[in-house]
Image (tube, rainbow, N blue to C red):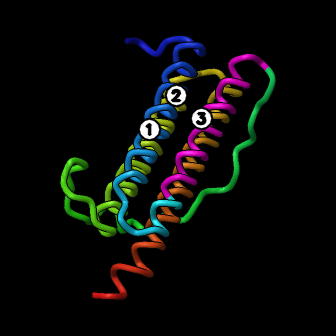
Amino acid sequence: MALDTVDKILDFAIRSEEHAARFYTNLANKAGHGHMKQVFLDFAEEEQGHKAKLLAIKEGKQMLSVEQRVLDLKIGDYLVETDPFDELDYQKALILAMKAEKAAFKVYHDLASATDDPMLKATLLELAQEEAKHKLRFEIEYDDNVLKEN
């Protein structure tokens, strides 16, 4: 599918947020660690919030502003791939989440590069930064609770 109109880009982004919300809900259901279960449910809710923002933008009700760049610890860049169908321990769940957020950041960044519409570009870059914040939160959690334990 060619993402050659604002509506197509927004529809793609909305579907991506729906997928992300399901992803985090599924991770929450697999999480054995009580704290992580709630973290994943919170992320699923945030992704639903992103979807709501995109729908509001599509309906012409809201625009977002671009925030400053978010720090990237790059921990997720150096981790071994994990299969979401494997038994999920705390470490694997965090790795999956970091990789999902990195992919989401790249999707929004690439979508922003694909449009000439300045308002849509700003919105997509804002959402990319939101995903970068999510990745950072998982990286901090990983650093605090996995790397420091080993």
Which badge, 2 or 1, is on the more N-terminal residue? 2
Q: Inspect the image, locate mark 2, and give the three-letter code of the amino acid beneath it.
A: Ala
Give the image location of residue 142, x and y in percent. Answer: 40, 73
Q: Position of residue 70 (x, y in %)?
A: 58, 60
Whole-percent x, y for residue 47 in the image:
56, 42
Query: Which mark lies nearer to you, 2 or 1?
Result: 1
Residue 98 is drawn in which quadrant?
bottom left
Q: Tell me the kind of residue under disc 3.
A: Leu
The residue sitting at the right extreme is 61
Magenta residues, as a range?
A: 40-60
Residue named by callout 2 = 13
Which residue appears at 45% of the width and 65% of the height?
A: 36
- Callout 1: helix, strand or loop? helix
Asked if residue 126 lies left or right of residue 32, the reply is right
Quarter of the figure with the N terminus:
top left
For the point 41% across and 78% down, the residue is 143
Indicate which disc residue 22 carries.
1
Viewport quadrant of the C terminus? bottom left
